[in-house]
Structures are given as C-alpha cells and as structure tokens.
Amino acid sequence: MTIDNKSILLIDDDVIVNSINKKLIESLNKFDSVEIKSNPELALEFFENQIKNNKNIPGVILVDISMPEIDGFEFIDSVEEILDENNIEEIPSFIMLSGSKYKRDFEKFDKTPIIKKFLMKPLNKEELNAALLEIDMK
C-alpha cells in the first residue's frame, strides 16, 4: 500500500459542490482518479478499506472544514490515527476547504501542520492548481 499521487479524494457534505469541484479537478488533468464522498464517515470507511485491502490511498485529500457529522479537523485526526494504527508513514497531502472566515478556523489550520493548504470556497481552478504545485503535485 502506498500513496497514489494520481488519485484525489474530495469530501464535502454538499452534493452539488462535489459535482462542480469534481469537474474542476478533472479539468486540471492532474489526476487519474477523483473519489468523492459526501459524508466524512463514509470517507473514513473508504480510507480504512483501502488500507485493509492493501490498495493505494489518494495522494491528495480535499476536505470541507464544516460538515454535520465530523468536521474537517476531526476527519484529519481520524485519518492520522488510522495511519498510525497501521504503521503507515506516508501521509496524503491535505487541503482544507472552507467558506468560513472565522479566525478560530485559520488559527486551528495554523496549528495543524498535516494540512498543507487552506482554500476558500467556492473552489477556484487557478488557486487549486497553484496549491497543488506548491505541495508538489505537478
């Protein structure tokens, strides 16, 4: 099992936003696979199943900060636990998505080094491309 840098996982509880963002991601022609989950619990299940079945995990994970069941930060904490429990040292590149302008969210982002970038919604093709280049996802 390794990180697949040609695969991306998008997690947002808004189905319409997911559809729009999937098209935007596909238009970048950087990924062979765009996996979408509209529920962070389903995303965690997907993640665990990939590991359990010795399949590659997405190299980039775009996660919404504000979701009803589990917020983006809690999701990332859970992924870190899963990686630790399975002795996996490679970590996907996390990009946090948010429509929030709350200072506490930016402060929490600053204190969470596993998150590589923080992008505001709606997702913008140029900003996403720049973020991917910055985290070396050419």
Image (spheres, grey):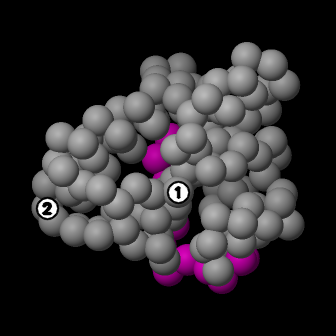
Residues at marks 2 and 1 touching, judged by CB atoms closer than 8 Å: no
Highlighted magenta segment, given as a residue range: 27-38
Mark number for residue 60?
none
- Residue 74 in the image: x percent, y percent? 46, 26
Circle 2: element type: loop
Say which amino acid is labelled 2. Answer: Asn
User: What whole-number distance in Å separates the C-alpha atoms at marks 2 and 1?
Assistant: 21 Å
Position of 43 relative to 24 (above/below): above
Residue 128 shown left or right of residue 53 in the figure: right
Mark number for residue 93?
1
Q: Quadrant of residue 2?
A: bottom left
Residue 71 visible, this orientation: yes
Mark number for residue 53?
2
Q: Quadrant of the C terminus?
A: bottom right
Residue drawn at x 36%, y 40% is 79
Question: Is residue 36 a member of the stretch shown in magenta?
Answer: yes
Residue 106 shown left or right of residue 57 in the figure: right
